[in-house]
Amino acid sequence: VFFYASTFDALTMVMSTYSYKGDSLEEPGRGMKAYWSLLFVVLPIGLLFSEQAMAELQTVSIIAALPISVILLMVIISFLKSSKKEG
């Protein structure tokens, strides 16, 4: 529970800071933090009650991970080539 609460608090702080239109060093107001807190609570609850949304979310996650996996493969290949040259 502690890990979830601290992660939730950090996410709320980061999102409210990025969406705050004030000075970047100034802490966002309570209203902005409350907005993001409610959004982070309501969206997962909505996903739990929607059966088809989970399947769509899985599909989007797989499609979004494809470019990252290509880049990861390129990094692995370049690492192997580099270690061959040095070894």
Image (cartoon, rainbow, N blue to C red):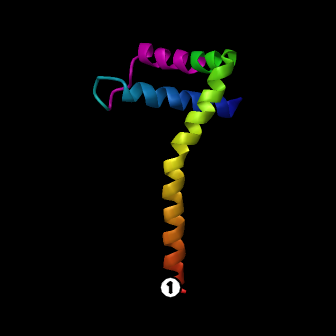
Point out the stretch of residues depicted in magenta. Answer: 25-41
Q: Is 65 or 35 nearer to us in this picture?
A: 65
Q: Tell me which amino acid carries mark 1.
A: Glu
What residue is rendered at 65% in x and 21% in y? Answer: 52
Magenta stretch contains residue 34: yes
- In the picture shown, does residue 33 fall above or below 9? above
What residue is rendered at 59% in x and 18% in y? Answer: 41
Q: Position of residue 23 (x, y in %)?
A: 28, 27
Q: According to the image, label 1 marks what residue?
A: 86
Q: Residues within 10 Å of mark 1 (few under 14, many from 20)?
A: few
Magenta stretch contains residue 8: no
What residue is rendered at 39% in x and 17% in y? Answer: 29
Q: Is 7 or 49 nearer to us in this picture?
A: 49
Q: Position of residue 44 (x, y in %)?
A: 62, 21
In the displayed structure, does residue 50 sit left or right of residue 43? right
In the displayed structure, does residue 28 sit left or right of residue 76? left
In the displayed structure, does residue 26 sit left or right of residue 33? left
